[in-house]
Amino acid sequence: MERKVRVRFAPSPTGPLHMGGVRTALFNYLFAKKLGGDFLLRIEDTDQNRFVPGAEEYIIESLKWCGLVPDEGVGFGGDFGPYRQSERKAIYRQYADQLVESGHAYYAFDTPDELDALRAEAEANKTVFSYDLHTRGNLQNSLTLPAAIVQQKIEAGDPWVIRFKMPENTDVVERDLIRGEVKFNTNQLDDKVLFKADGMPTYHLANVVDDHLMEITHVIRGEEWLPSMPLHILLYEALGWAGNRPQFAHLPLILKPTGKGKLSKRDGDKMGFPVFPLLWSDPKTCEVFRGYREDGYFPEAFVNLLALLGWNAGTEQELFSMQELIENFSLERVVKSGARFDPEKAKWFNRNYMQQKSDDELASLFNVILEEKGIRPDDAKLVHIVGLIKERCEFVADLWEQGKYFFEAPSGYDEKTVSKKWKEDTSEKLAALVAFFRTQDNWEAIAMKEAFSAFMNEKGWGFGVVMVPIRLALVGSSQGVDLFDICELIGKDETIRRIEKAIVTLG
C-alpha cells in the first residue's frame, strides 16, 4: 500500500523567518497539495540557548499571511503531536539508549575545555580537529573506558554526551530528488552529538525520530542540510527504520542580487529591500527589520516571486495563482544551482498583482491610508480615482503619491515647470479661463473638454499655452491624469480656487 505523502516545515524559533525559510515552507506545501498529502509545522526548539521570544508566533503569522496554512502542527492541532520538540523530551532518550545498546552510539565525557584545547593544538599544527573514527580511540568515551568507569561517571553526574559511532570507510549513497545521486564516505564524517546530559537531543536525533514517528515521507529542506543527510540515513538504518525512511530533496540557495553568496538578513538593510515576510523587532538587540507585508507587498506577489526562485514551470508563464502553482509544481523542475534574488523583479510582481485587483478592492485599501490622514471621500468618487491612477502604481501606498492632488491643493509648484511654462501673459489668460469656467453648468469631464476646446478656438490660443499652467495650478507639477478628469473630481469651486491661488502666487 502506497504511503500518503506527508511533509513538514520544521523551523527553529531563533529569530524571524527568512524569505529562504518561507520558500522552503512553500515548496513543501505545494508538493503536499499537488499529491493530496499533508503539510505539517513542527517547531524544533531543542536549542534552548538560542530561543528568541516571539519567534514562534512570528513563524505562524508569516505562514498564515502567505496562505501556507498547515494541516497539522503547532497552533493547528493534529494526531501526531506534540509538534513542539521541547514538549517531546521524554521521547528521545529511549532512542539514544537504543543506539548505545546496539553499538551505534557511545557516551563521551570530554569537557568543552578539553575539546577546545585539542582544536587549538590542531590549529597550531595547521590541521583541523574532528571527533571522529580517527580520534575517538584516544578520547574519554565509553569506547575507550571500562564499562565500570563509564557507569561510575554517569552516576557521579559527570557531564556527558551521546555521540553517533560513524562506521569506518562506508559509502552512503542516496538519490536526492533534486540533485540526483550523491555519495558520502564515512571516513570524512565526524561523530555527531545526538543527546546531551541536560536531557535534550540535538537536531540530528530529534529530527530523525520525529520524522519517523510523524510518518514523514519526504524531507524537503535547504541545501545547507545536505552534509547531514548521510548521518540521518545511517540513523534510520541503526534504529531499524530503513524500510520506510523518507526521501530527501535539498533546495538551492537564494543568492544575493549580485549573484555572489547566500542572501542574508543583513543584505536587505544594505541594499534597501526586505528579506523577511513580516516586520521583525528583535527583543534582544531592539533592531527593527523590514517586512514584505509592511512594505506594501501583496502576499500573492510575495509567494509568486518565491516560487520562481529555483523553480519554473517549463513555460514562459510568470504569474501564478496558488492553485496554478499547486497544479504545476514538481521537484523535477527545481534547479540545483543557486537562485539570484532580484528586488526589482519583486516590485514587478507586486505591480502586476496590483493591476489585477478591482478598483473597489484597491479603493478599500487606499481608504485606510486616507482615513489616517483624516480624509473621508465619497466611495464612488474614490473608486473612480483609483481607476484613473492605479496603472501608475506598484504599491497601495503609491496611490497617495499619484493621487493626493484629488484630496488636497498643492502646497507648492514645481520650479522647473514654472520657469518653462509660466509666461508673462499666463496669469491673464488663466483669469479669462476662470471667468469662462464660472459660466459652465455641466462639470463632467467630457462636456468640460468640449466647452474648453470651443473657448480656446474662439480665443485663438494654442492648447499648450494654458494646459500645463492649469495642471500646475491643480496638481503642483506637470504630472497627473487627464486634466478634465481632475477638474470633474475635485469639483468646479475647487478647480477655480486652485487656479486663482496659482495666479496670485506665481503672478
Image (cartoon, rainbow, N blue to C red):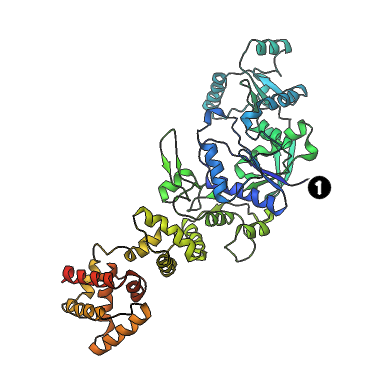
| Quarter assignment of residue 311 | bottom right
- Describe residue 453's horizontal placement relative to residue 271 as left or right: left
Nearest the eye: 138 or 426 = 426
The correct choice, above or below, for 94 with respect to 273 in the image is above
Q: Residue at x 62, y 38 (%)?
A: 74
Nearest the eye: 377 or 200 = 377
Nearest the eye: 174 or 16 = 16
Q: Is residue 233 among what the camera can see?
A: no
Q: Position of residue 417 (x, y in %)?
A: 25, 71
Q: Position of residue 64 (x, y in %)?
A: 57, 47
Q: Residue at x 24, y 81 (%)?
A: 436
- Mark 1 surroundings: few (<14), some (14-19) or many (≥20) residues within 10 A: few
Q: Label 1's element?
A: loop
- Describe residue 238's horizontal placement relative to residue 428 as left or right: right
Q: Is residue 449 among what the camera can see?
A: yes
Q: Residue at x 41, y 41 (%)?
A: 288
Q: Residue at x 81, y 47 (%)?
A: 2
| Quarter assignment of residue 239 | top right
Q: Which residue is identified by label 1?
A: 2
The correct choice, above or below, for 81 with respect to 312 in the image is above
Q: Position of residue 390 (x, y in %)?
A: 43, 66
- Describe residue 445's horizontal placement relative to residue 503 as left or right: right
The correct choice, above or below, for 77 with respect to 439 in the image is above
Q: Position of residue 121 (x, y in %)?
A: 54, 23
What amino acid is labelled 1 in the image?
Answer: Glu
